[in-house]
Image (cartoon, rainbow, N blue to C red):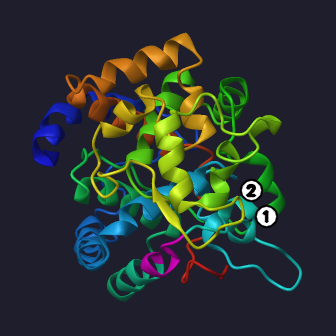
Amino acid sequence: MASKSCLVLLLPLALVLLAGSSPAAAQLQVGFYSKTCPSVEAIVRDEMEKIISAAPSLTGPLLRLHFHDCFVRGCDASVLLNSTNSNVAERDAKPNKSLRGFGSVERVKAKLEAACPNTVSCADVLTLMARDAVVLAKGPFWPVALGRRDGRVSSATEASNQLPPSFGDIPLLTKIFASKGLNLKDLVVLSGAHTLGTAHCPSFADRLYNFSGNGVDPSLDSEYADKLKTRCKSVDDKAILSEMDPGSFKTFDTSYYRHVAKRRGLFQSDAALLTDATTKDYVQRIATGKFDTEFFRDFSESMIKMGNVGVLTGTVGEIRKKCYIPN
């Protein structure tokens, strides 16, 4: 599926790449490392194939790392930085406590440092890994323009204030996405990333217990709510994971939209997609299963846009040697 999608997507996506969302994003280029590290994409893909072969459930977390990076200070790999005695970094913010895949990023970065020292940024590594995670989960391929540089600042407070919350409604989510140059279509399309991965109970259990003081969230299918309750015994249950796209959480496909259309989206933010005419129409259209190629194209275009958010280029920022600490 990925190879067929590649042929369909390359031409229109080239136009998205050329568009750029800012002067800095316009400096990104496909083939940016063609002279300094020509094997960069092959090295990343080779390691990703090994990583996902050993742990298929990492596709969702690695995609999520990229999302959470780009929504705070732009796609500058600030989410990868460790906290210090004087600073609590993004990765230790409450919304990021469940992030996984940091070790995989370091593994890929180490391979690139061995092949091309001081050349490829952690921000580019994370962007490529997110793309490859989707491809290896049988999703679409899209060209990734490179040339991002790494930020030196990481703030847990900024992460808590800027990341889209799982309880967000359409007005709040639209405002957050707009602040990153992303529109309502990007919101409903990128929500499709919930086809991959799992979630801990505290991120959605409020919908099952004492929702607005009235028990179960009425926007949640009652049978699905009962099933979730058998796994999540309370809002504080942190040990149990639930699939965001039940039965298909390791495969990138359109089944997420079928669940949402049946009021079986895991998060309030998923349910919110049915409260707006534009997003509801998109959900219901993709849920038919007749427009998978359209969704793959849309997702690729939105990922390119998101990957351009707030990028550092030129001489701004740095190329970290290790992704968890500034040089």
> Magenta segment range?
100-105
Magenta residues: mostly which secondary structure?
A: helix
Q: Say which element carries label 1.
A: helix
Numbered circles on residues, count: 2
> Which residue does the image show at 26% across and 56% down from the upper left?
137
Asked if residue 47 lies left or right of residue 185, the reply is left
Residue 239 part of the magenta-drawn span:
no
Residue 103 part of the magenta-drawn span:
yes
The residue indicated by pointer 2 is 159
- Kindly give the residue lying farthest to the right in the view shown: 86
Query: In the image, is residue 163 above or below residue 56?
Result: above
Q: Nearer the viewer, residue 289 or 229?
A: 229
Q: Position of residue 216 (x, y in %)?
A: 66, 38
> Which residue does the image show at 63% across and 50% down from the upper left?
204
How packed mark 1 is, by other alpha carbons closer than 10 Å (few <14, some 14-19, many 20 or more), is: many
Q: Position of residue 236 (x, y in %)?
A: 72, 65
Residue type at mark 2: give it. Ala
> Which residue does the image show at 57% across and 77% down from the upper left?
320
